[in-house]
Amino acid sequence: MSDRLPPLTALRAFDAAARHMSFAKAAAELNVTPAALSFQIKSLEEHLGAPLFRRLNRAVELTDAGTALAPGAADGFTALAAAWRAARRTVDQSTLTVTAGPAFTAKWLAPRLFAFAQDHPGIELRFSATLRVMDFSRDDVDVAIRFGYPKNEPGLYTQPIISEWMTPMMTPDLAAQYQTPADLARAPLLHQDDIRFLDPAVDWPAWFRAAKLPPRFAAGARFSQADHALDAAQAGGGVVLGRISLAERALREGRLVIPYPIALSTEARYTFVCPEGAETRPQVKAFRDWVQAETASLGKFAEGVTFIEAADVVQ
């Protein structure tokens, strides 16, 4: 029996039929007639010298040979599709797909989209707001911006872009009511659950320890996403332990203020990630350089602030 591979079109027809367990549905997926699909599968069976399907009344099922072939055919077409997408990305210099978490997309990336478009009119920037772990070989994504602890992964280019720190933030009206850190003992506190993975914790009890104040464990409004907690703070709903990366715009526009010079820092940070070698592609490099320039403005809010490592206030 020859090891020569059969025609790709025949294998494609088999893969679709094996996934759908229906010649009619497979034909519809491939935009061919059922007769044409049946012909391709028959030619594949002749090439193999054995049937791949049992033709039943209004149904089909795989034979032993078909069962042996189906997983490899599916994996092969998946890998081929991923390789084709990767090849297309190497020659495409006009589009850039970036994925980042929903909060960072809403509070940092999206408000700056117009500025990037003005600076780079030849690049179409696309956002995918998700925390799902990306597989660059499978997903149609060029760059990921992720928040967490830095780590080096084989095959990936990584560059830290924002060192995160957190401090109490509130509206100017609330700041007039709670003029000292001790005044927070009677303030409504807002909580955010999306940073609960940080270890050591960066939360209200940790900040009160850093400020050398009795800890407060009072219940308050909880939010699954940091941007929602910031929105509540801007509406005057309470005091948030705001993340500088997400609150920069509200601080710059005066909707929130930082009344106390005490902040918690963490080793977790935002990292720019792309496949190794892709960082030199024109649109990826342009976006990376632009992000670095934009994040430089965060430094102004650190002036006069005392930073205390979260690890130094562990109870």
Image (tube, rainbow, N blue to C red):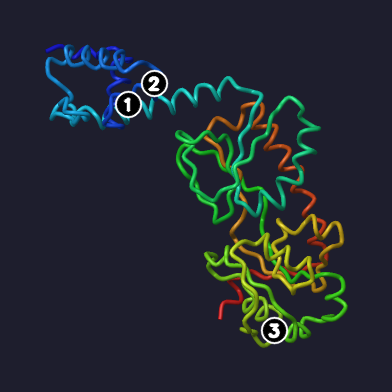
Residue on which the image places disc 3: 212
In the picture provided, is 127 more to the left or to the right than 81? right
Q: Residue at x 72, y 45 (%)?
A: 110
Q: CB under 8 Å between callouts 3 and 2?
A: no
Quadrant of residue 303 within the rendered picture:
bottom right
Q: CA distance from mark 3 to mark 2?
A: 68 Å
Which amino acid is tagged 2? Leu
Q: Residues within 10 Å of mark 1 (few under 14, many from 20)?
A: many
Name the residue carrying label 2: 30
Residue 84 lies left or right of residue 14; in this view the side is right
Q: Please say if the residues under marks 1 and 2 sit with CB atoms less than 8 Å apart.
A: yes
Q: Mark 1 = which residue? A: 16
Q: Which callout, 3 or 2, points to the residue nearer the camera?
A: 2
Q: Give the Cα distance between marks 1 and 2.
A: 8 Å
- Quadrant in the picture for residue 285: top right
Position of 113 relative to 268 (above/below): above
Q: What is the C-alpha distance between the residues marked 1 and 3?
A: 65 Å
Is 158 on the left-hand or right-hand side of 18? right
Which amino acid type is marked by label 3? Answer: Lys
Report the front residue among 151 and 172. 172
- Eyeballing the image, is 271 above or below 27? below
